[in-house]
Image: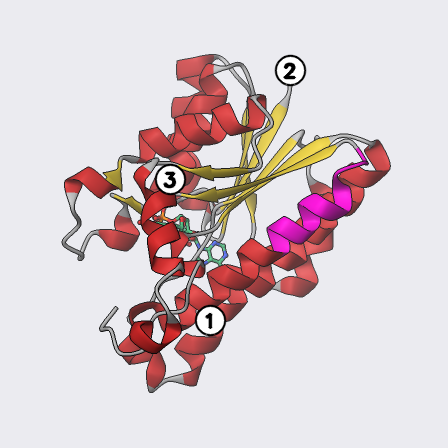
Amino acid sequence: MPTVLLLGATSDMAIAIAKQFGAHGYNVQLAARNTKQLTTIESDLQVRYNINCTSHAFDATSFATHQTFFDALPVKPDVTISVFGVMDEEEDAWGNWQLTQRMIDTNYTGAVSILNIAAKYYMQQGNGTIVGISSVAGERGRQSKLIYGSAKAAFSAYLSGLRNKLAKTGVHVVSVKPGFVYTRMTEELKLLPALTAQPAQVGKAVYNAVVNKKDVVYVKWMWRYIMLIIKNIPEGIFKKLKL
Ligand SMILES: NC(=O)c1ccc[n+]([C@@H]2O[C@H](COP(=O)([O-])OP(=O)(O)OC[C@H]3O[C@@H](n4cnc5c(N)ncnc54)[C@H](OP(=O)(O)O)[C@@H]3O)[C@@H](O)[C@H]2O)c1
């Protein structure tokens, strides 16, 4: 049976992705800062899908622990999915370097740190799949997503470069740009239902992307075109918009 590793497994999106892989016969490794929060989902996945599910302590910003974390996994995963992320209020982060650094360290540096380790392992094996949950917020810098967007832009560029680096090694890299999703991260925001996905839709999109070897996935198709328009607004106009 193949195994999938979810990094940031307490997130609503990660749980939905875990259910999709579990339903298709994958064993599941759940990795999060607080493993106590994983107890219920771990037993639920095991009972529901009759799979092996394990929990592992993982902090994206404890970079020095990442190699030990990966080495200690009882079975090396066939698919590694980076879901963790932080989106603080940009106005709060503007006045607080700690919040700014936390967004950069979690959304970008932490992801590069752990995915480099998985990528090197997969390169040696000559197979494996890496999935990164990035964001459409990384497609063009905007004031409302100043730091979060720039960290996701860096993460998207990293995933693209990694896909290019590994293309001939048998290792596949998927970039996921979900658009809005109803999760804990967005529960305070007023989101347009037509543009907002449920976590289960993300789960399906991620599973299908892995199986069908897709490179870049937008969960709701309209986001590809919305971002195409946003990316093509001339800078002279764009810089004056309140976006
Ligand atoms: N929701 C959206 O509209 C949306 C849109 C585009 C992209 N995304 C991205 O989708 C991903 C999942 O987010 P979500 O919407 O499901 O939000 P969420 O429920 O708030 O999940 C965020 C997850 O990141 C984990 N995390 C934060 N810092 C961590 C660290 N240092 N080490 C390990 N885990 C850490 C959190 O764990 P704790 O439980 O320990 O806090 C939590 O499980 C994120 O990368 C987010 O940027 C979300």
- Expressed as whole percent of the image width and height from the top left, the position of residue 131 reads 57, 40
In the picture provided, is 64 more to the left or to the right than 150?
right
- Expressed as whole percent of the image width and height from the top left, the position of residue 107 reads 49, 60
Where residue 37 sits, quadrant-wise, is top left
- The mark nearer the N terminus, 3 or 2, is 2
Residue named by callout 2:
1
In which quadrant of the rendered image does the N terminus lie? top right
Q: Amino acid at mark 3?
A: Met
Q: Amino acid at mark 2?
A: Met
Q: Is residue 163 magenta?
A: yes
Q: Please state which of residues 92 and 62 is positioned toward the viewer in this rendering.
A: 92
Q: Secondary structure at mark 2?
A: loop
Residue named by callout 1:
102
Q: CA distance from mark 3 to mark 2?
A: 23 Å
In the picture provided, is 94 more to the left or to the right than 157?
left
| Residue range (magenta) | 158-169
Q: Is mark 1 within 8 Å of ligand 1?
A: yes
Q: Can residue 133 be seen?
A: yes
- Expressed as whole percent of the image width and height from the top left, the position of residue 192 reads 16, 46
Residue named by callout 3:
13
- Expressed as whole percent of the image width and height from the top left, the position of residue 136 reads 40, 53
Magenta residues, dominant SS class: helix
Question: Which residue is at a point 48% across and 53% down the rendered structure image?
Answer: 33
- The mark nearer the N terminus, 1 or 3, is 3
